[in-house]
Amino acid sequence: MQQPSSYQLAPAMLVDLRDTLAGHAYTVDAVLAAIGSTAHAALGRNSTVPAVEALAGRDDPLATLIRLWPLQRAVDRSAVERALPGLVEPLVDTGVLVVESGGVDSPGPPGADSRAGEMVRAEVDLRPYAADDRDLLVFSDLTPGLDTQVAPMRPDFVLGVSSASSTLAQLTIRRPVSAALDLGTGCGVQTLHLAGHAAAVTATDVNPRTLELAALTLALNGVSAELLDGSLYEPVAGRRFDLITSNPPYVMSPPRAGEERLAYRETGYRGDAMMEHLVRRAVDHLNPHGTCQILGNWAHVGGQPWQERLGGWVAGTGLDAHIVQREVLDVPAYVELWLADAGLAGSADYRQRYAEWLDYFAGLGIEAVGMGWLLLTRAGREDPWLRIEDWPYAVEQPIAPAFAAESDWITASRRSDDELLAQAWSLTDDVIEETTGQPGAADPQHIVLRQQRGFRRAIDADTALAAVLGACDGDLPLGVVIDAVAGLLEVDLRQLRADLLPRFRILIADGWFA
């Protein structure tokens, strides 16, 4: 791996930089207001032209900062000096910025000293990030491939805030904890979140350059964390945490002779063996009632259901597990996605690399790739709870509150029949009822109850279940309600209880009751 650069920004300089950027309102909201939602969406697709047009004619400091970092443009030095007074030389000396000669992309006002056409461009990205009602800043590498340029990445490339990191942030349970682990910290995004509710945060990564930029991110935002160099669980051998969160290098790419892997997304493991390792070893690093939340990929291997494969990863660990498959890609779609991500779309050897990936997957028997979420909990149950599901539907975001409540729901669902029947249950206030049927018919053909929060699950309820749930308003014990419904429908009470109680347990575990 390449040796890390040395971005030696002194603490006082970081304070000056933070204060200067705050003074110019270099925030997510301000950038969005400056370029507009359409240009902002285009920038998310790596297209800068709409944002460049939106800033035409502006020479204020915020416009300069947007050109310098999100748009990655070379900017007239005098404009940068006005935006970052007293900071340009130190940032150049430390390698964050670089000075070059060239034409003026964004000229200053008439008469401004441009130092004979000197231009400044960024060598390292510095973006605003909004999290937990805080305006933060994140160091990372510059976005490759802007405006369709072919731009292969260095092996120790440090990815900035991405859709994957944002997704993991929405998944992560935010209850206060004593010790949290950000495994594979990248640019430090998850650590920024964890610092808001964990007394102590440890962040690890196998890429020294990543740890360097993460340290800058944390220091710039006034966040303290322990940063450790090493692969997966190795840096924290023998230690346990209340919360582990990980967006690991889960991409299943073929090895290439003489070529280093992209550290932020790939490992030397075959197929999805790295993901299996993370899951199997999580129990060794969790405190009682601790949770591990992972964003990742897994293989669909011919001849074995994917649920069975992933269930095997959890078997014997003693952990509760909820695995949610959000998307499935066929092999060509997966290959195309990650070749483009590496900046290889349009490269001279694109076809050869594509074929190498196909051959690699065929050799492993991989027919498709699942993408999704894993929640592992050291709940201490004699009979651990396991749910593996395909759930591509819209969910409430952030989904973390649903995950946070899940363990209590499971415990409640496992109470005895007598305990369930003795309790007065109340549906949560987000549940709505939908009915369909022929116009004028006495009864609906279908009764659907639907959650508006969490996973937004729905059930097709028969008359008996709909009647029981409709009466669950916290006033009467469940046993009394079922007795009354059995009388109204003129059905056997014992048979109705035997039919409804198992279904009722599932609803409890899915969070239908307050």
Image (cartoon, rainbow, N blue to C red):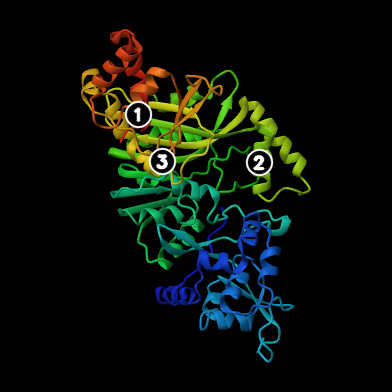
**Which sits in the foreground, 216 or 105?**
105
* Image x and y of residue 229, in percent: 43, 52
Q: Judge whether 383 appears above or below 391 on screen.
A: above
* Helix, strand or loop at mark 2: loop
For the residues bearing labels 1 and 2, Cβ distance under 8 angstroms = no
Q: Which circle marks residue 509 in the picture?
A: 1
* Image x and y of residue 226, in percent: 35, 56
Left or right of 477, for residue 88 = right
Pointer 2 residue: 256
Cα distance between the residues tagged 3 and 1: 19 Å
* Helix, strand or loop at mark 1: helix
Residue at (31% x, 47% y) in the render? 175
Quadrant location of residue 105? bottom right
Pointer 3 residue: 293
**Which sits in the foreground, 500 or 437?**
437
Name the kind of residue labelled 3 in the image: Gln
* Image x and y of residue 386, in percent: 39, 26
Cα distance between the residues tagged 1 and 2: 46 Å
Q: Judge whether 344 appears above or below 3 on screen.
A: above
Q: Closer to the N terminus: mark 3 or mark 2?
A: 2
Q: Quadrant of the C terminus?
A: top left
> Which residue in the rendered view is the most extreme toward the front?
440
Name the front one of labels 3 and 2: 3
